[in-house]
Amino acid sequence: MADLLGPKVRIVHLTGPVFRALARGDLAAANAVSPVPVSAYFAGPDWHGVWQMRGEQVEEDPASAAWVTGVIWDESRRLAVGRAGYHGPPDPSGTVEIGYAVEPVHRRRGYARAALEALLRRAADEPRVRTVRVTISPDNQASYRLASQYGFVEIGEHWDDEDGLGIIYEVAAGRS
């Protein structure tokens, strides 16, 4: 169980072979090369597209592995509870976009908040990062409420053929 301050998590970066195994739905192969063990949910259909996209991204640009989606790792429980990271390294304007998702069985325990805080801390510590962006579906009120507590403000919207409409929010790095 989490302490009064919430769970202590870190984002564990993954490698190309882990991304490829998860994208194939091969949990055994993923766990054979992953720095931390992950559950069957990670290799399931809900996150297949993310792993496929990140695997291709890391193959094209190996340095992006230090930025893109990794595992939300609960330090005290030694348990993978979700995924979080940036969509890539900072763009030329200093913007990074974040994403996070918690496995359904671990939701409502403070993991999304802890992951968001970890991502914001890293962004604040990176001299190249000026702005942190998150895109949230209009139906995802929980994510909107969380982001709004950290100073994210709406700046526009975006249509994605896979995810549909997303509302774009930003906050200055180090100012949340």
Image: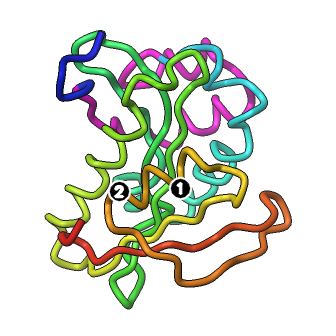
Asked if residue 89 is positioned above or below residue 58 in the image, the reply reads: below
Q: Give coordinates of residue 68: x percent, y percent.
A: 45, 54
Q: Amino acid at mark 2?
A: Gln
Residue 97 vs 12, above or below: the answer is below
Q: Residue at x 27, y 30 (%)?
A: 9
| Label 1 sits on residue | 144
Residue at screen point 27% across, 34% down: 10
Q: In front: 80, or 102? A: 102
Query: Camera-side residue: 59 or 146?
Result: 146
Q: How many marks?
A: 2
Q: Secondary structure at mark 1?
A: helix
Q: State the separation of the CA atoms marked 2 and 1.
A: 9 Å
Q: Which residue is mark 2?
A: 149
* Residue 10 falls within the magenta-colored stretch: yes
- Would you call the spot at circle 2 few (<14 residues within 10 Å), some (14-19), or many (20 or more)? few
Callout 2: SS = loop
Query: Is residue 40 within the magenta segment?
Result: no
Task: Report whether 130 appears left or right of 147.
Answer: left
In the image, the segment drawn in magenta is: 8-37
| The furthest residue to the right | 161
Mark earlier in primary sequence (2, 1)? 1
Residue 120 horizontal side relative to residue 64, left or right: left
